[in-house]
Amino acid sequence: MTETPAGTPIGGPTPSSNSVPLAATDPDNWHLRESYTFDRNVIAEIRRAANTGIYRIRGWGAKRRLPTLDDLVFLGASMSRYPLEGYREACGTDVVIGESRAKRPVHLKIPVTIAGMSFGSLSAQAKEALGRGASAAGTSTTTGDGGMTTEERQHSSVLVYQYLPSRYGMNPDDLRAADAIEVVVGQGAKPGGGGMLLGQKITERVAEMRTLPTGIDQRSACRHPDWTGPDDLEIKIIELREITDWQVPIYVKVGAARPYYDTALAVKAGADAVVVDGMQGGTAATQDVFIEHVGIPTLAAIPEAVRALHELGVHRREVKLIAAGGFRSGADVAKALALGADAASIGTAALIAIGDNDPAYEDEYRALGTSAGFWEDFQAGTDPAGITTQDSDLSARLDPVLAGRRLANYLQVLTIETQILARANGKSHVLNLEPEDLAALTVEAAAMAKVPLAGTSWVPGTD
């Protein structure tokens, strides 16, 4: 047996008799092994913190590796189940929300919605584009902190009005003009924290809508000022129904922290839909430590919310579940539906679809110290694509008609991909997908999703 010479990496090439350690021939390279714990990004952040004494604020969502829906696969149909023919057999995609209580339930043609993103964090052109794209695809878009703009109301066939702790821009007339109301308790990127809008984005129009001074950082409250718990939430939901004459559905949105209990409490408070936002969800601006270290992944959150709905006897009935946080493809949507969600909501993906991080502006991203596909400083107001900015010159770059068409195309692809996977599993409607259509590729994913590890019947954590 030949011994491995000292200094030769285990599993590396077998050295020849005259091989020489790398350090002897290239002394500048022997020490260039990056630490897993202290990689170059960690070192850069330590240096930045030491130089400034200021915690880091950024946009986007969690960037570290997390368990995702990629860790699940569909089994497909064979002998025990027959698939549907793609061009001859229909596969429904519609979703109805609020039919039990609201006089005007929300009817969606597709199981994908646009998440709440505020005017202020986004330009007016971006808000219009989201409305145009969602309307063309037959789905809803959502306002966000700061109120409703005329652009998004005019161009959104179904508009959900977010009712947030800040109450910025809130008025009863806009509530009545909406097609649904979403009471925001938490957000996936920052459960337990409030929103931020830095002073450079507080223009005269934004300030007027929010009753704020221009140019001053805005930090939203982390909890509602007039209620402190689920009993008060029930009173608030009744109040909102009375303001809107029981016309529209009421959603409750929670950041994924304790989704089983939060979903159960939202249902008991009278919600028509519960939106559970996993930690992959994005934000316009919050502390980096929040984004990376608070909340649980979307994959883990959905089954827990579904468990609560099942135990209360309302799953896929009078209360709908909308999953959010990091959705990118029709495969993600289909897997969320198979786990028990009724729809998926997208935010970051929608911004990318309308032009965020567009390579056409690579030179300008480089000038900002980053690159197209990596830019995350949504809080800065310097977005070359004109989306996350209030700079009139930059925002004028975004054509809302063209951007809306791009979003509609993207939503169409998501829907078709979801249908393809539903048909492959023998389903005539995407909401007929179920956990037994899935298998997990890792033990962690199997435990979180509560589906068997691929090739076995074992669900970790069960007898």
Image (cartoon, grey):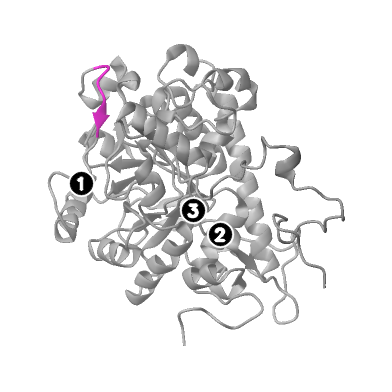
Q: Which residue shows up at 44% across the image and 47% down it?
A: 281
Task: Please tell me in which quadrant of the rendered image residue 418 appears.
Answer: bottom right
Task: Please tell me in which quadrant of the rendered image residue 364 appears.
Answer: top right
Q: Which residue shows up at 19% across the image and 44% down it?
A: 243
Report whether residue 334 is seen.
Answer: no
Q: Residues within 10 Å of mark 1 (few under 14, many from 20)?
A: some
At label 2, the amino acid type is: Leu
Q: How many marks?
A: 3
Q: Which residue is mark 2?
A: 69
Most extreme residue toward the right is 17
Q: Which residue shows up at 47% across the image and 69% down it?
A: 448
Numbered mark located on residue 344 in the image: 3
The reply to whether callout 3 and callout 2 are in contact (CB within 8 Å) is: no
Q: Position of residue 312 (x, y in %)?
A: 32, 74
Q: Provide the major secondary structure of the magenta segment.
A: loop
Q: Position of residue 219 (x, y in %)?
A: 24, 33
Most extreme residue toward the left is 226
Q: State yes or no: residue 263 in magenta.
A: no
Question: In front: mark 1 or mark 3?
Answer: 1
Q: Earlier in the sequence, mark 1 or mark 3?
A: 1
Q: Residues within 10 Å of mark 2 (few under 14, many from 20)?
A: many
Q: Which residue is mark 1?
A: 223
At label 3, the amino acid type is: Ala
Residue 241 appears left or right of 107: left
Residue 125 appears left or right of 177: right
Q: Position of residue 242 (x, y in %)?
A: 18, 49
Q: Earlier in the sequence, mark 1 or mark 2?
A: 2
At label 1, the amino acid type is: Arg
Residue 223 appears left or right of 407: left
Report whether residue 28 is seen.
Answer: yes
- Between residues 134 and 4, which one lies in front from this camera angle? 4
